[in-house]
Amino acid sequence: MTTVSAVVQTHPSDSLLVRAARRQRVERTPVWFMRQAGRSLPEYREARAGTPMLEACRTPDLVTEITLQPVRRHGVDAAIFFSDIVVPLAAVGVDVDIVAGTGPVVAKPIRTRADLDRLPELTPDQVPDIAESVRRIAAALGGTPLIGFAGAPFTLASYLVEGGPSRNHENTKALMYGDPELWHDLCARLAQIAGAFLRVQAQAGASVVQLFDSWVGALPLADYERYVRPHSAAALAAVADLGVPRIHFGVGTGELLPAMGAAGAEVVGVDFRVSLTDAVRRLGPEYAVQGNLDPATLFAPWPAVEEQVRRIVTEGRSTPGHIFNLGHGVLPETDPEVLTRVVELVHEASSR
Ligand code: CP3
């Protein structure tokens, strides 16, 4: 197998990404993009043509190829495993589909105790292909680290309870506030599933993991602490003994950043609404940060993009550790050449 790492690195555990996550000295700022593998790339659209999303996620040849595509094209400092947050839910038997342009759709939403009984725990033997894909990718990447990931309990619960994407999460909140016991049991199960999925990836060769709590910014801090944080902490604790740095990310989570760090992460993801400087003021010196270019900025003329990237690199220098990323995922219509230019600029602007 060929290696795609641009820089000769001995081992992913010494990579820029892992060292920045551990708040160690780095020669330059590592950069990768959430949703870097996906519809912005013509080679992705070609590879995926004719294969439904969830089937693609369970096919090691495709997962390997698609995961490596953005590393080859952009020269990013990490690969993120090509999968989806609902893959482990489908693996335990949830009838879920990913509808193009919409997102995950669940045939029978989970709203009662009897519904929860239809959601079993995840065991590694249900996802042998995931371990196989991770092993193949890690071998092909050489010194470039692979990021494994899972959806956090709140975000997974939102899809399961609503039955699909939701703006207001009203059924989710009705369950959370109306039947806290069932809510906690549901989230404990989802924490087991997310934790087991992270553990499979880390044991097979992922060097970093990220827990995506994309929609948890819908909650005030007090409710996050009471209804969510213990479960996200349990998911992150499932890989605590494996020594892989853990990134904890959400959108609209400015008020939640310290609580998300305290859930057991080494790195806290910051969206574009809070500056890295303010994020570090809130988090204190114990955490590295990841972020935070607004993905919509990539549609502006290059000089505007450049100004924002330079500002974020400069702010990142004053943090305990910085991983450059977007504040949320790459939008499908993004020009991939702009992404490549951003990688080059981060590398150039941060070199010391
Ligand atoms: O490149 C990467 O970041 C790795 C792959 C990845 C996907 N989904 C692939 C995908 C990751 C990390 C995810 C996580 C994910 N999935 C999240 C958390 C991150 C976030 O963006 O907040 C969430 C909320 C989901 C649920 C989900 N799956 C959504 C909202 C969508 C988009 C629906 C659409 O068509 O707009 C999906 C589908 C999905 N997941 C695609 C990809 C590449 C698109 C599938 C396609 O090509 O049609």
Image (spheres, rainbow, N blue to C red):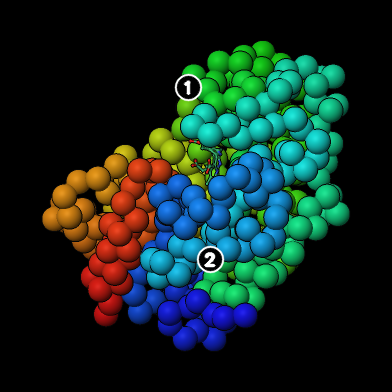
Location of residue 47 with respect to 140 vertically, above or below: above
Measured as percent of width and height from the top left, residue 49 is found at 56, 47
Is 31 or 130 nearer to us in this picture?
130
Q: Residue at x 39, y 76 (%)?
A: 26
Q: Quadrant of the N terminus?
A: bottom right
Q: Is residue 245 visible?
A: no
Is 336 or 91 nearer to us in this picture?
336
Task: State how far apart marks 2 and 1 are (Cα).
Answer: 33 Å
Of the image marks 2 and 1, the number of the one nearer the N terminus: 2
Q: CB under 8 Å between callouts 2 and 1? A: no
Location of residue 330 with respect to 6 vertically, above or below: above
Q: Identify residue type, mark 2.
A: Leu
Q: Is mark 2 within 8 Å of ligand 1?
A: no
Q: Residue at x 45, y 62 (%)?
A: 70
Location of residue 213 with respect to 119 vertically, above or below: below
| Left or right of residue 243, residue 222 in this image | left
Q: Residue at x 39, y 39 (%)?
A: 254
For discs 2 and 1, the disc positioned in front in the rendered view? 2
Disc assigned to residue 327: none
The residue at which mark 1 appears reads as 167
Location of residue 59 with respect to 30 vertically, above or below: above
Measured as percent of width and height from the top left, residue 106 is found at 68, 26
Q: Residues within 10 Å of mark 2 (few under 14, many from 20)?
A: many
Q: Residue at x 63, y 27 (%)?
A: 105
Disc assigned to residue 68: 2
Find residue 160 and report its image quarter. Answer: top right
Count of residue discs:
2
Measured as percent of width and height from the top left, residue 51 is found at 63, 46
| Left or right of residue 197, residue 114 in this image | right
Q: Identify residue type, mark 1.
A: Arg
